[in-house]
Amino acid sequence: MSKYTFRRYLLFVASLFINAFGIAFITKALLGTSPITSVTYVLSLFTPFTMGIWTILLNLLFVVLEPFLMTRRELREDLRMYLLQIPIAFCFGLFIDFSMFMLSWLEPSAYVMQVTVLLIGCIILALGIALEVKANAAMMAGEYFVKTITRRFHGEFGYIKLGFDITLLTIACILSLVFLSDIQGVREGTVVSALLVGPIVHFVSPAYRIFDRWINAPIKQADTPSAQHTNTIITIAREYGSGGHLLGERLAKELGIKLYDREFIHMAAQRSGIDEQYIAKNEQSIPSFWLKCILSKNSEQPVEASLSADDILFVAESRIVQELAAQEPCIIVGRCADFVLKDHPKVVKVFCYSDLKSAVNRCVNDYGIPQEQAEAEIRRINRNRIHHYEYYTGWKWGEPHHYHLMLNTGNISLETACKLMKEVYQNISKA
């Protein structure tokens, strides 16, 4: 085992404890526990076993059931991850009991204090989940069980995870009614934690980039192309109606290099197997940013293991961007290319924007959009681009520090903007 792998496991164990501590905080708020521990909490109320012990038993049950949903080949190929669930189950259960013991003094009585404790617990749990995603070393049994179901029935991880959580809550309610004559462990706090933890994970995840160098082996210099053999790439991010595509066309003719924009729809369809019409309609947009955070981020899964159609499309286009950059100098419009190529040694990153009046005029005159619809269309598309970019990159869209050039095409002509980009391109190419 390399030291980097060891460090990943170390982070993973730390994240398990943080998760357990967050769950304990949520439980001590007395407003209902999290969905994943709802059944174990209710069981602990009318049996001699603790919530931690029941957590171990429930997770071991998942481990026993999983092989029945897997082929022999899948089990053989994923044997290490499968077997790791067993020690993880014991650790997680013991961490929960230890955390509950540490917080035995915490008994909020006033509703305001209960809500405060609940919110603190949600934040702690989100910090633990984000750290677990960063470690990317193993999976807890509940998550692995959902992954197994997803693979067996070819569903989307996020929605199956949601159904799994609802099933656990239903079972918890039934157990509570049968053995306690009342619903306990499932209250408004359960709903709050289910809705809040995922978005918090999304917003705190970028902070964990501080661990990247610590857990990832450095790339050997021999594996990195030398500067003189590296293609210079221009990426253009743009507000709708700013003329980013028109600017790219003009510059491509000036420099004699290829422009890639609408071509991505056909290329991504071939790569991902997704219908071109779906890509054209949904590319670079997220129908519900908040729902996407809840479904995809409220789990211990890295994005590669829980791909929705949106995720598959993003991954496919990202790989195409990387391949194009390796083949030849070119101009790439959109597709989060400035982020995808963040480690590429020669990239000219450009952001085009304009005032609303100029954008409306361009939409009407160049894009053929009716005057009365133009402003609403600009706001809608820009909002989708912001959500898509910030969800997948963790960066702020249009942040000046991410770009070499910020071009206000409402105040300067495309000809002037083209000259500025050409000069920067030539300077970076010569470097």
Image: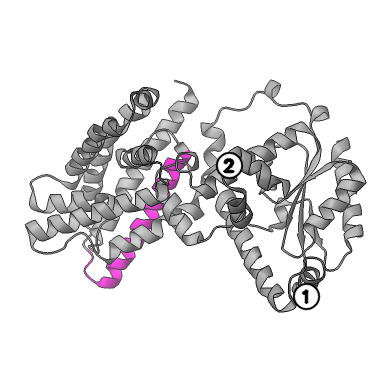
Residue drawn at x 43%, y 27% is 6
Indicate which disc, 1 or 2, sits on the residue closer to the N terminus: 2
Residue drawn at x 74%, y 77% is 371
Q: Is residue 288 magenta?
A: no
Secondary structure of residue under mark 2: helix
Q: Residues within 10 Å of mark 2 (few under 14, many from 20)?
A: many
Magenta stretch: give its range: 108-134
For this rendering, which residue is in front, 422 or 287?
Answer: 287
Instruction: Give the amino acid at mark 1.
Output: Lys
In the displayed structure image, the side of residue 203 where residue 95 appears, left or right: left
Looking at the image, residue 230 lies above or below residue 42: above
- Residue 203: image location, x then y, percent: 50, 55
Is residue 317 at all visible to an observer of this figure? Answer: no
| Residue 357: image tag | 1
For this rendering, which residue is in front, 287 or 192?
Answer: 287
Q: Main secondary structure of the magenta part?
A: helix
- Residue 147: image location, x then y, percent: 37, 40
For this rendering, which residue is in front, 391 or 256?
Answer: 256
Snapshot quadrant of residue 220 = top right
Q: Are marks 1 and 2 in contact (CB under 8 Å)?
A: no
Instruction: Give the amino acid at mark 2.
Output: Val
Residue under pointer 2: 315
Q: Is residue 118 magenta?
A: yes
Is residue 245 at all visible to an observer of this figure? Answer: yes
Looking at the image, residue 370 lies above or below residue 347: below
- Residue 304: image location, x then y, percent: 49, 39
Task: Give the mark count.
Answer: 2
